[in-house]
Image (spheres, helix red, strand yellow):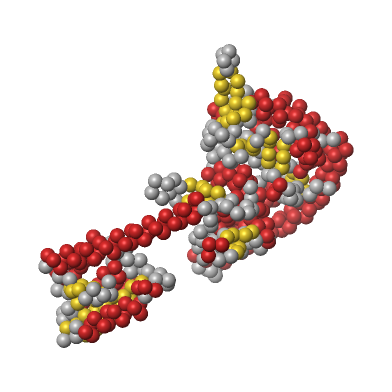
Amino acid sequence: MKRGIRYLRFSHDGQSQHSIERQETITGQWMKFNKVDIVDTFTDEGYTARNFDRPDIKELFAFIKKNYHGINYLVVSELTRFSREAGDAINMVKKIQATYDIRIVSASRGAVYDCLDANSFFMMGLEFLLGNSENIKRQNDVNGGIYTAKAIKGKWIRGGKRPPYGYKIEGTGQERRLIVDRKEAVAVRQIYEDYLANIPVYFIRQRAEELGFYLTGHSSIMKILKNPIYCGYQYVKAWKENPGGLFPMKDHESIVDAMTWHAVQEKVRGIHQPKKLISDELPLRGVLRCHCGLLLTGAPSRGKLGKYYYYYKCNRSSSHNNISAIKAHTQLEEMLGYMSLPDKLIKKIQDQGQKTMEAELKLGKELLQEKKKEYDDADAQLKSVEEKLIRNQIAPDTYNRWHTELTQKKASLREHIDRLSHNNDGIFELLKNELGKLGDLQSIYTEADTLEKQELIRLVFDSRLYYKNGIYRTPYMLELFHHNVLILKEKRLLELDENEKRELTLPLRAGGGTRTPMP
């Protein structure tokens, strides 16, 4: 009686047509009908056939090498179960037959292939190639369907086991979509705001966890910051001649605005505008954005009489923005005039700011004493560890570990102590003497040089000021200047994005970096 070994495989749980049970039945029937004794069965579950990096097929090859004497056949239900890469598969089958005199069997076709017979070799190659072309066609159909759904229909295609943090799934099938999880969205917004406020990532995580952020892993915060889904876009891979890139999602609610997301991406990539962008004629070049998120560029344009006129424009599309610099500057200066602070508000901020600073100073002194005590304790522990080493009470590797940890702890505490020990008296004088200048914000801007003008715009609007349909817009403005937002909107000078009109904070920062609420 002849003897054979079986190989069964399926690539994923939903592949019912080529399930293990079906393959087992087909190969078993062929071996029974042809009176072939089953020596052993090797099964790979959940592995692709694009290569031979599969645990059980490696064991199969090792088994053949050791026990090939008396084995006649390697039986599979279809050749595609063995491999879908025609070239590699044919070479492997030829090697198995030439080295061990074992022939491969396609049980569903009832074919025993012989690599030394021209007709048999041709039919075997044809079956492999048909499986290969079927795989390519299926992959193209899948990729084309995904591209159409994402790039053209704007649908969300699930890429993992769960939706992105901040969202939950609603509906099924074609009606499935992402909806905002209000509780998780708070943490997402906080992550974006903290990152733009130059807060260290480890501290951003701590603050987010206080709001319920549960994702683990060192890169989870950066994945949140880089994911365009939070501003209503998704990445789409290029498919054939169709371009890839960012495409808008339809019927999708954003958690952060596009301006914020693009500002974060520039910071993540460490983008800095080159010096050539600085121009006294175009002070907003490099700080004012188009509504698509790109920073506007600018250049002079020669008129009919030979005179040059300056314009701001979007490099992505000429239909987005092409603004006269004179118009943009006039609007901005008028806008800053209405944003100037009234005397009563300045006085109120000064009083509240002084109270806040006094409270922060008191808290800082208490924290300073606490950190000094921690420093002394760490120093004492370090000396104790050194004494134990001298007395041979601890091993050198234990000493090295403790010495490194305690030394690092002391350095961190010393840095914290030095920062807390800094004299903040000058802040009181700055608050008292300089805040009054905000009563004429327009003059501050016009008298500043170009670099100072740009820094003022970045500070007041957090690098998110943009221009659309003849009006300045922003998802964020320091609440210090919110007193005339309705007038600014009525005069079509500046409008706050509706979805960003939520609780903001006054830009007074204490030594620890916390924001002080508006009184």
Residue 141 rendering spot, x and y as whole percentages: 39, 58
> Looking at the rendering, which quadrant does residue 2 occupy?
bottom left
| Nearest the eye: 481 or 116 | 116
Please report the residue visible at 11 percent of the width from the left and 67 percent of the height from the top: 117
Does residue 212 appear in this view?
yes
Quadrant location, the N terminus: bottom left
Residue at image location 65% in from the left, 61% down from the top: 181
Q: Nearer the viewer, residue 76 or 72?
A: 76
In the rendered structure, the answer to whether residue 98 lies left or right of residue 220 reads left
* Image: 297 above or below 147: above
Compared with residue 373, is residue 500 higher up or lower down, i.e. above or below? above
Residue 58 is left or right of residue 475, and the answer is left
Q: Position of residue 292 (x, y in %)?
A: 58, 41
Residue 288 in the image: state x and y as whole percent: 63, 35
Question: Of all residues shown, which one is farthest toward the left?
Answer: 117
Q: Is residue 69 left or right of residue 373?
A: left
Q: Nearer the viewer, residue 356 or 502?
A: 502
Q: In this rendering, is residue 73 above or below 173?
A: below
In this view, which residue lies farthest toward the top?
305
